Image: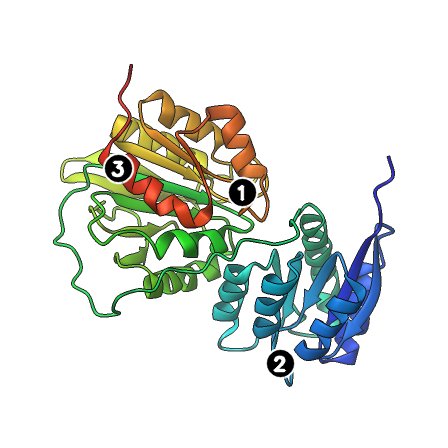
Amino acid sequence: MVQPTKRVLVVDDSAFMRGLVAEIVEFRDDFCVVGTASDGVEALEQVRLLQPDIVTLDIAMPRMDGLAALERIMSDSPRPVIVVSAAESADFNKSAVKALELGAVEFVRKPSGPVSVDLVDIREQLIRALDTASMVRFGPRVPQLKTAPRVSHEFAPPKPRRAARVVVIAASTGGPRALAAVASRLPADLDAAVVILQHMPAAFVPTLAERLQQICMLPVAVAHDRDQLLAGYVYVAPGEGQTSLRNVRQGVVLQVESDDPLCAVRPSADPLFRSAAEVFGRRAVGVVLSGMGHDGAEGLRVIRGAGGGAIVQDRATSIIYGMPAAALATAGADRIAAADEIADAISALVSRPRRVA
């Protein structure tokens, strides 16, 4: 069966970059460029007029920048958006993470040196991003996953104490958007440690942790090897190596190792989930959010087999339903929840952990 050609709108304030991106898009027979725009205002007009299947979007533009345009697109006429932006800016990582949180499917770096040198790399990145975007299925309206307002940016971190329970969360494409909805609703008195594993470039992970700290009432930090797992703290797995949990004399610690990727990704959720089941048993809760592939599915099955709880994001609020669907098929779930309902589901399972029959 021949797949229909995906119609792409190219948005960039540089005529040269519009031409380059358009050339790369049309290199593939299954994509075609239906229009271009030079700023965010024109982009919104072209989205309404042309109804493209996919939008490539620059960040730094006159009149309306890419982040503002992205927020409007996702609110008014949601569709897959690929952000294509320069890496020279000091705010590049913040812009990237913010774009992913707003709902962008992928983030592609513009050439930073001679275009002839970087052309192969950007071509490969953009083609992969287009393939990913072509798998996204937005409905007529995407539920707006607004973060819950944080009472105050000034708060006292919980008194350090060993974690008796753990929540492990796996996310990939579409994950930053769901994570913002989850983290902003986690209660300040959550009686568990939380370990988040998001598939993204390693350089973005510290920025993701900083962003989550801005909206979460629990302390958030990037995990390091041998960090002690403390109740009421959130740890974000680093982008290099594999992260897991293990018992030592002083309690449970995080273990970060430079192993080969599993499930074609690094870090992989399955080793983390399996270790959570081994160390915490029925006192573990696994959560699988939006993403492509099946990472976390087998690990969630192990958690449930050990008597722990399982939560899977629902189809309606997942940008890509691959990981949640695979987890549900492999492991089942105690809760299937919208992104902005998952924190409540976590609290319920932490306070009432499943018991082995």
Q: Is residue 353 left or right of residue 100?
A: left
Q: Nearest the camera: 104 or 242?
A: 104
Q: Does residue 29 appear to the left or right of 38 in the view shown?
A: right
Is the N terminus in the top left, top right, bottom left or bottom right quadrant? top right
Where residue 273 appears, x then y in whole percent? 38, 34
Residue on which the image places disc 2:
64
Q: Which residue is mark 3?
A: 350
Image location (x, y in percent) of residue 163: 19, 41
The residues tagged by marks 3 and 1 sit, at their Cα atoms, a distance apart of 28 Å
Q: Give the residue number, with chain letter if any, for mark 1.
A: 265
Q: Is residue 321 above or below residue 178?
A: above
Does residue 165 sit above or below 223 in this rendering? above
* Residue at the far top in the pictured view: 357
Camera-nearest label, 1 or 2: 2
Q: Quadrant of the C terminus?
A: top left
Residue at (65% x, 49% y) in the render: 139
Left or right placement of residue 52 versus residue 217 in this view: right
